[in-house]
Image: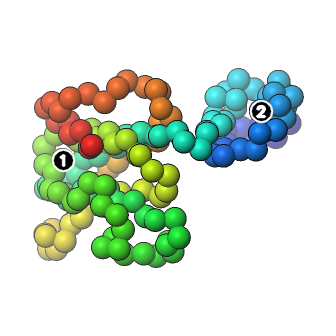
């Protein structure tokens, strides 16, 4: 009934470390959900690795980009300098060719994508980006570095 009155109210649900009884309960209720809604629910185990896929481009000039992992016990307002660098910040010519990056996330936690403009304070930039978290084995494997493509690993 909720889906009929409020379509597309659910973007995606990740269930991580669900109790052992959850699959039985989910099997009972999934028949009442539409196929589209069932595809949005992902049940994840505790030792699965995820892939982070990021595409970005900038208008005007190059932009700095880095990926950092925030340790679980740290507050959300933490500085990037206190985080664990997964991919240190580096300048990308994303204004010439859009960047398509893939990264395997070996550890659970919050990953922070940092777009850096500190080296050109007087010139503002507009950054467009798309980020997806893919389950293991979902989608194409990471491709080797090619034109306009950078493998984050």
Could you tell me which residue is drawn at 84 percent across and 35 percent down?
Answer: 25
Label 2's element?
A: helix
For residue 94, side relative to residue 53 (left or right): left
The mark found on residue 23 in the picture is 2
Residue 86 % position (x, y)? 31, 55
Which residue is more in the foreground, 47 or 152?
47
Residue 21 % position (x, y)? 82, 38
Residue 108 % position (x, y)? 50, 52
For disc 1, the neighbor class at 10 Å (few under 14, some 14 to 19, many from 20) is many
Could you tell me which residue is drawn at 15 percent across and 30 percent down?
Answer: 146
Give the vertical position of 122 relative to 102 (above or below).
below
- The residue under label 1 is 94
Looking at the rendering, in which quadrant would you find the N terminus?
top right
Which residue is more in the foreground, 93 or 149?
149
Could you tell me which residue is drawn at 41 percent across and 39 percent down?
Answer: 51
For residue 66, side relative to residue 119 (left or right): right
For disc 2, the neighbor class at 10 Å (few under 14, some 14 to 19, many from 20) is few
The answer to whether any part of residue 107 appears in the image is: yes
For residue 3, side relative to residue 69 (left or right): right
Q: CA distance from mark 2 to mark 1?
A: 43 Å
Discs 2/1, front: 2
């Amino acid at each position: 009934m909720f889906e009929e009155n409020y379509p597309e109210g659910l973007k995606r649900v990740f269930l991580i470390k669900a109790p052992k009884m959850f699959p039985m309960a989910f099997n009972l209720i999934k028949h009442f959900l539409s196929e589209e809604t069932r595809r949005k629910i992902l049940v994840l185990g505790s030792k699965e690795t995820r892939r982070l896929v990021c595409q970005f481009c900038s208008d005007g000039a190059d932009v700095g980009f880095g990926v950092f992992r925030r340790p679980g016990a740290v507050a959300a307002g933490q500085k990037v300098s206190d985080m664990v660098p997964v991919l240190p910040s580096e300048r990308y010519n994303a204004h010439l060719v859009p960047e398509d990056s893939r990264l395997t996330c070996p550890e659970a936690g919050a990953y922070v994508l940092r777009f850096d403009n500190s080296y050109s304070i007087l010139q503002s930039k507009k950054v467009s980006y798309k980020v997806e978290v893919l389950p293991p084995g979902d989608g194409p494997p990471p491709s080797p570095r090619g034109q306009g493509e950078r493998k984050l690993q």
